[in-house]
Amino acid sequence: MTTMADRARKSAIPFEAKKDGLRQRQSGDWVLSLVIAAADMDQRITAAAMGTRYECALVEKNDDESPRDHRTEARDKWRELSPVKQAGIRCGDPVFWAFLDEEFAPDKHNNHDDAAEIVRSVCGVASRSELGKLGNQEARTHWYNLDFRFQAWKARENHG
């Protein structure tokens, strides 16, 4: 049985392109301009009528031609932040508020202050700044566990 993915791979038009321009229209739609080397230009593209629709997948390349993984970079940047900064960022995130509401209390927690209060309670601190104190490993462990639970919850929400 031929799957949709099999048909897409068979019909794919491979080429390398460089971003040449980006602008936003009044409608909110974006116009992305790409430069394609003459050797990579496929006749199916040049022969297609204006307005022809394409399904696209773009993969940014590193200098060594390997695909760039932005998810790994974002995760690494997150880990470089102190627990104090991480908690501050999470407490300003409405998605984190939804997680706290679902996991910790039946009433809505839809603001920064409510989120900060729950984080302090879960971590056993009077202030999130205590997460940065050297002798407070237990509070940091509670924070990391809470953040891990949030990320797992978010993954479940995103992927069913």
Image (cartoon, grey):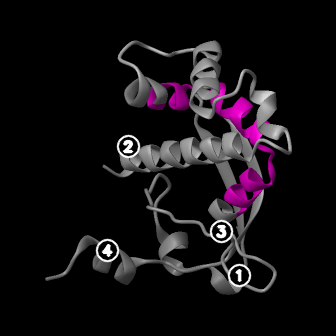
Of the residues under marks 2 and 3, which one precedes in the sequence?
A: 3
Tag 2: amino acid: Glu
Choose between 154 and 70: the one closer to the eye: 154
| Disc 4 target residue | 5
| Disc 3 target residue | 69
Q: Which quarter of the rendering shows the N terminus?
A: bottom left
Of badges 1 and 3, the one in the foreground is 3
Of badges 2 and 3, the one in the foreground is 2
Percent across and percent down for residue 110 are 52, 15
Other residues around mark 4 within 10 Å, as few (<14) / some (14–19) / many (≥20):
few
Tag 1: amino acid: Ala
Percent across and percent down for residue 62 are 76, 77
Of the residues under marks 1 and 4, which one precedes in the sequence?
A: 4
Magenta stretch, residue numbers: 73-99
Residue drawn at the location 61% of the way across and 79% of the way down: 15
Check if mark 3's residue and mark 4's residue have beta carbons within 8 Å. no
Tag 3: amino acid: Asp
Is residue 70 among what the camera can see?
yes
| Disc 2 target residue | 157
Q: Residue 38: which numbered mark, if any? A: 1
| Residue extending furthest toward the right | 134
Label 2 and label 3: CA atoms lie apart by 22 Å
Other residues around mark 1 within 10 Å, as few (<14) / some (14–19) / many (≥20):
few
Of the residues under marks 3 and 4, which one precedes in the sequence?
A: 4
Of badges 2 and 4, the one in the foreground is 2
